[in-house]
Image: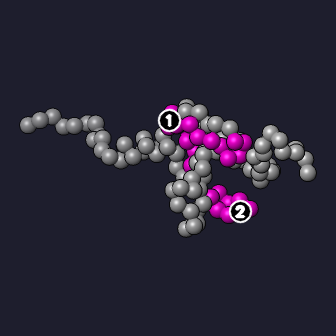
Amino acid sequence: MSPRRNRPRRDDDTRLDADRARHGVASVQQWRDGDWQVRAISGGGSTKTYRCPGCDQEIRPGVAHLVAWPADDRGDLTDRRHWHTGCWRARDRRTPGVQRGRGAPRYG
């Protein structure tokens, strides 16, 4: 007879929880422009460079940030956008960044 096992068995649930901890858990946030699924990405879970739509700056690998996409049925995976956390929180207070050429007038 073999001895009794005192340790709990590790199964796929442990792996799923580790994945959820690394990639974050999506939550629904309500903004003026609708409901958004938002997921926080830890620095360790970030492996690629993204462009933040709020400030038009790069989000480098290893930097914690947010991923947001529409919560309704209109959006799909191509609608996901990676945001700096501060840019996401301030997006109602910001004007959209307009891309201008060097020769374009700054005002008017």
Res. 62 in view: yes
- Total number of numbered discs in the rendering: 2
Which labelled disc corresponds to residue 47? 1
Residue 60: x percent and y percent? 59, 33
Q: Quadrant of residue 85?
A: top right
CA gap between label 2 and label 1 equals 29 Å
Looking at the picture, does residue 107 appear above or below residue 33? Answer: above
Label 1 CA crowd tier, 10 Å (few <14, some 14–19, many 20+): few
Q: Residue at 88% x, 45% y: name it.
A: 105
Q: Is residue 4 left or right of residue 7?
A: left
Q: Amino acid at mark 1?
A: Thr
Looking at the picture, does residue 9 appear above or below residue 70? Answer: above
Residue 68: x percent and y percent? 60, 52
Q: Nearer the viewer, residue 50 or 42?
A: 50
- Report which residue position mark 2 lands on: 33
In the rendered image, the residue lying farthest to the bottom is 73
Which labelled disc corresponds to residue 29? none
Query: Quick one: SS at disc 1?
Result: loop
Q: Nearer the viewer, residue 28 or 101?
A: 101
Looking at the picture, does residue 61 appear above or below residue 105? Answer: above
Label 2 CA crowd tier, 10 Å (few <14, some 14–19, many 20+): few
Q: Residue at 28% x, 41% y: name it.
A: 9
Q: Nearer the viewer, residue 22 or 46?
A: 46
Q: Residue at 74% x, 62% y: name it.
A: 32
Res. 38 in view: no
